[in-house]
Amino acid sequence: MQLVRLLLAILLPPVAVFMTYGFSFTLIVSIGLTLLGWVPGIIHALWAISKHDEKIKQSTI
């Protein structure tokens, strides 16, 4: 699942953020950044996914 989200973060950033966070403010930011430019959308999606995964790892320790 992690690989799918990372690939989607590059191809369709808002979809990857939606798969990670659902409907949230993060999704709205991702859509906005993607509309402003594809590269900012990718950067935000990769950052959001990595932060979410990091938070999950910390909560399981």
Image: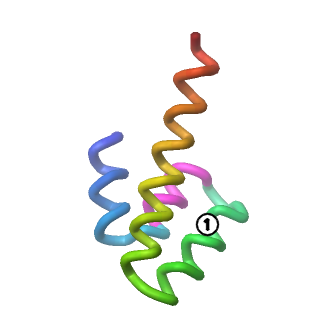
Magenta portion: prevailing SS class: helix
Quadrant (top left, top right, bottom left, bottom right) of the N terminus = top left
Q: State the image quarter where residue 23 is shown.
A: bottom right
When the figure is inspected, residue 1 is found, relative to residue 42, above or below; the finding is: above
When the figure is inspected, residue 29 is found, relative to residue 48, above or below; the finding is: below
Provide the residue designation for mark 1: 27
- Is residue 58 shown in magenta? no
**Residue at 40 percent of width and 68 percent of height:** 42
Quadrant (top left, top right, bottom left, bottom right) of the C terminus = top right
| Span of residues in magenta | 15-21
Q: Position of residue 16 (x, y in %)?
A: 44, 59
Identity of the residue furthest to the right in this view: 25
Query: Relative to residue 48, is residue 3 drawn left or right?
Result: left
Callout 1 amino acid: Leu
**Residue at 59 percent of width and 21 percent of height:** 58
When the figure is inspected, residue 57 is found, relative to residue 14, above or below; the finding is: above
